[in-house]
Amino acid sequence: MDSSINTLTSASLRIDISSLGAELKSIIDTSDQEYLWQAEPSFWSRRAPILFPIVGALKEGKYSYQGKEYQLSQHGFARDKKFSVLSCSDKQVTYRLTEDELTLKNYPFRFILDVCYRLEGNRLDIEYRVANPSTESLWFSIGGHPAFSLNWGVEHNISDYYLEFSDTEAVDAALIENKLLGKPSLSVFRAGRYIDLSDILFDRDALIFTKHLSRKVTLKNKYSTAALSVSFDDFPHLGIWSKPNAPFVCIEPWQGHLDTIDHNSELTEKAGIVCLPPNQHYQASYSIEINPA
C-alpha cells in the first residue's frame, strides 16, 4: 500500500486516509462494502476534499484584503497540499498543514491547520483545528466535501436513494448562478424532511442551505435497512451536490460558503468567514456513521 495512506480499523469499519490533502479515501465495512465514492474520473476524480481557506468560488476568482487583491481557486488550496502526519494509531490519525511561500502569495496569512480522524465502532469523527500563530487576525472558511457511493443498497438506481433531514425544514435550496450563490431557489423537500435523489436533481449544480434547522442528514436506500449519516452540529451551512446521473452524492458541512452574486469581494465581509484573533484556536467537527443492513 502507498506509504502516504494511513489506515484506521475497528470491529465495524476500515478507514483509509491519504496525507495528500488529508483526504478520506475509503470507508469499508466487514462485508467489504465500500461507502465512499471512489473517484471515477468520468464523473468526478475526487473523494472527500477538505475546503480551506475558502468554501466554494470567489466572485471573479479574487478577493480583496487590506487594499490588495488576491486570487484563489474554488475551495482553496488545502485539498492539493501534502500534509504532515503528527500522530497515528489504529484508531486515530492527525495531519498538519501550515503556510508556505506559495500559499502566502495569494493568501497572506500564517496558519496551522490540523485535521484529526478518530474511529470508534461504526462512527468516524473528523475534526478541524485552526490556530493563528501570527500577530494579526486570521480570516478563513473551512468545510468538508465527502462523496458517498450509491451502490450499497439492494437496488442501485439513483432514484432508489433519498436523504432524510433530522428536522422538518421550511426552506428551499439556494441555487448557483455562474459558480456564485444566486437568488433562484428550488423546492426540494418531500414532507419537509426528505430529498429524493434523481438523474436531474443536480442539473443546476449544488443545493445550498444556509438557514436550515437540521444538523444531521442520513442517506438511505428505499430497499435496504442500511443507512449512512452525517452529523454536523458545528457547521451552520450545508451543500448537497453531485454530477447529473452520477452514482454518488456529497453531503458537505460548511463554515462559510461561496460568494453571493452581489458580494463586494472584501474577504472580511464574506458570508460565514471566521476571524481568528492572534494566538487563538478554532475547532469544529463532524461525523460519518455507517449502519450496515
Image: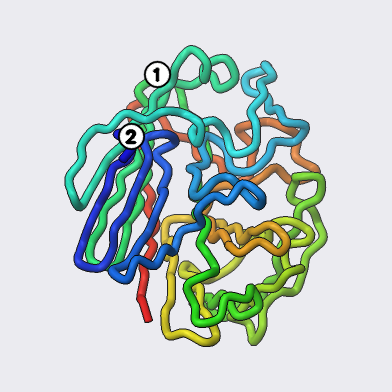
- The colour scheme used here is rainbow
Q: As rendered, which of 265 and 251 lies closer to the eye?
A: 251
Q: As rendered, which of 198 and 181 lies closer to the eye?
A: 198
Residue 77 makes an appearance in the image? yes
Q: Position of residue 273 (x, y in %)?
A: 56, 41
Residue most extreme to the top: 101
- Residue drawn at x 26%, y 57% is 119
Nearest to N terminus: mark 1 or mark 2: 2
How far apart are the two marked residues, 1 and 2, measured between alpha carbons? 34 Å
Under mark 1, the amino acid is Thr
Q: As rendered, which of 1 and 136 lies closer to the eye?
A: 1
Residue 236 makes an appearance in the image? no
Mark 1 Cα shell of 10 Å, populated few (<14), some (14-19), many (≥20): few
- Residue drawn at x 62%, y 19% is 66
Quarter of the image that includes the N terminus: top left
Quarter of the image that includes the C terminus: bottom left
Q: As rendered, which of 160 and 123 lies closer to the eye?
A: 160
Which residue, given by chain and number where applicable, does mark 1 sit on?
A: 135
Residue most extreme to the left: 89
Q: Secondary structure at mark 1?
A: loop
Q: Position of residue 231 (x, y in %)?
A: 42, 65
Under mark 2, the amino acid is Ser
125 left or right of 169 in image? left
Q: Is residue 122 above or below residue 192?
A: above
Give the label, 1 or 2, closer to the camera.
2
Q: Secondary structure at mark 2?
A: loop
In the figure, residue 74 lies in which quadrant? top right
Q: Are marks 1 and 2 in contact (CB under 8 Å)?
A: no
- Residue drawn at x 50%, y 53% is 38
20 left or right of 55 in image? left
- Residue drawn at x 41%, y 30% is 277
Which residue, given by chain and number where applicable, does mark 2 sit on?
A: 4
